[in-house]
Image: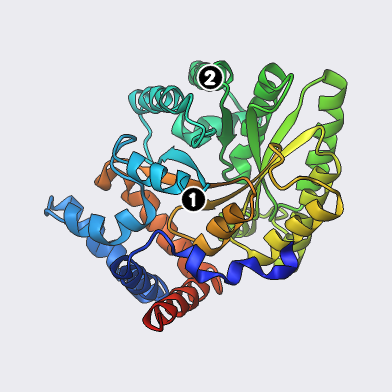
């Protein structure tokens, strides 16, 4: 039960890390805790890659190997196998961002489909994932969301729909679950509508396609309830990854600059309340809606464990999953697995240079999340001290 405070067990949390790896992790999080260092390191790394300096090995020994599985899916299998040995599933995430070319969108589509095929028959890899703007230009998603799709963009939108459908079909055929990442609100309307179409097509018996609910948006509970009613009438299941969200500052700044009411909750407490209400609603309707809880928040996780216990939901119920990013919150991931819950790590991978935009974004997000990095440092420090006393 959650009352045991299971996340305090650092021996389990860092069981896969050697003393040297733990020391490296401590140094890395110390650096990430400094906004000035993150800013300087980001600028220097971008400059080094622009000048074609040979820094790949340095990047791999530091930030890349901590947060990424490898440069390709086969390279990442070492991590997948080590996680599987302690009961943690893996979600390989091709984390190349910021592309705008049709050729790259087709490449990403083929990559996700090949990952689904690569993962089939591997119990340790039950999910695939992709980012909507990984298969089509942001401005097209935005145009559809705003009802301003013109003839010039229609063919692009048709290709986006075709890519999305082929990925979802592949997941359905290979009996995999497919997580669709959430993005900025001004493109999310189109992403939601297309995801709903895929759910209606492929989630007849059980969830294949999972959309993302970003709970810093104050309309997400209302959206969930309305879609639930619609899905019941049309006869398909829902799947949702529930997160707090990653674009708060950008959302508020855009709303202020353009003079519209921000879609973001008024403060952190309102966001926490929205998160709790969305999760509680899903657990109250678990026969219709499956849950992937994407959070690094201990309190939120404990609340879900208690709700499951009070509702008599089995720890290993296939409709409920917990997930964290690789390289973060191992005290949550590995202790949940030890207690028998379904849990998975998001494992980014890709060529070092191509994955740098993702790594830079991750470092900046860690710096801005109050308490996240200091919690990691405290846990690592505690485990290093425990090992010295052995």
| Image height of 323 relative to 235, above or below | below
Q: Is residue 22 left or right of residue 253?
A: left
Q: Residue at x 33, y 46 (%)?
A: 355
Coordinates of residue 150 in the picture (x, y in percent): 56, 21
Residue 19 falls in image quadrant: bottom left
Residue 26 falls in image quadrant: bottom left
Label 1: how many Cα within 10 Å (few below 14, some 14–19, many 20+): some
Q: Is residue 80 left or right of residue 298?
A: left
Label 2: how many Cα within 10 Å (few below 14, some 14–19, many 20+): some
Q: Which mark is residue 86?
A: 1
| Image height of 128 relative to 369, above or below | above
CA–CA distance in space, label 2 to label 1 = 25 Å
Q: Residue at x 51, y 70 (%)?
A: 10
Coordinates of residue 23 in the picture (x, y in percent): 32, 73
Q: Is residue 334 left or right of residue 67?
A: right
Q: How is the image coloured?
A: rainbow
Coordinates of residue 166 in the picture (x, y in percent): 51, 17
Q: Secondary structure at mark 2?
A: loop
Q: Secondary structure at mark 1?
A: loop
Per the image, the residue denoted by label 2 is 174
Residue 268 versus residue 296: which sits nearer the camera? 296
Coordinates of residue 385 in the picture (x, y in percent): 42, 82
Quadrant in which the N terminus appears: bottom right
């Amino acid at each position: 039960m959650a009352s045991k405070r299971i996340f305090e067990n650092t021996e389990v949390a860092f069981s896969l890390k050697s003393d040297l790896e733990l020391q490296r992790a401590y140094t890395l999080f110390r650096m990430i805790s400094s906004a000035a260092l993150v800013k300087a390191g980001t600028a220097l790394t971008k400059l080094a890659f622009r000048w074609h300096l040979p820094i790949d090995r340095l990047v791999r020994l530091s930030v890349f190997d901590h947060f990424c599985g490898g440069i390709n899916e086969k390279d990442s299998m070492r991590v997948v196998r080590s996680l599987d040995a302690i009961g943690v599933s893996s979600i390989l995430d091709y984390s190349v961002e910021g592309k705008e070319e049709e050729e790259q969108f087709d490449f990403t589509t083929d990559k996700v489909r090949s990952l689904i095929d690569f993962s089939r028959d591997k119990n340790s890899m039950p999910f695939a994932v992709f980012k909507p703007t990984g298969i089509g230009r942001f401005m097209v998603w935005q145009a559809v969301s705003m009802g301003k799709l013109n003839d010039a963009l229609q063919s692009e939108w048709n290709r986006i729909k075709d890519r999305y459908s082929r990925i979802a079909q592949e997941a359905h055929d290979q009996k995999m679950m497919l997580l669709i990442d959430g993005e900025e609100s001004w493109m999310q309307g189109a992403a939601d509508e297309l995801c709903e179409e895929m759910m209606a097509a492929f989630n007849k018996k059980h969830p294949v396609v999972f959309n993302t609910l970003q709970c810093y948006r104050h309309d997400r509970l209302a959206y969930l309830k309305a879609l639930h009613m619609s899905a019941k009438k049309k006869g398909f299941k829902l799947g949702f990854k529930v997160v707090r969200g990653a674009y708060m500052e950008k959302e508020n700044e855009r709303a202020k600059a353009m003079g519209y009411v921000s879609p973001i909750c008024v403060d952190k407490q309102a966001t926490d309340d929205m998160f709790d209400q969305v999760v509680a609603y899903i657990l109250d309707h678990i026969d219709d809606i499956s849950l992937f809880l994407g959070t690094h928040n201990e309190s939120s996780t404990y609340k879900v464990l208690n709700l499951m216990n009070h509702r008599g939901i089995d720890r290993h119920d296939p409709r409920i999953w917990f997930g964290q990013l690789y390289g973060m919150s191992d005290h949550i991931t590995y202790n949940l697995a030890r207690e028998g819950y379904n849990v998975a790590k998001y494992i980014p991978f890709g060529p070092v240079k191509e994955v740098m935009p993702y790594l830079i974004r991750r470092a900046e997000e860690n710096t801005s999340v109050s308490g996240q990095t200091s919690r990691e440092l405290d846990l690592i420090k505690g485990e290093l001290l425990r090992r010295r006393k052995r």
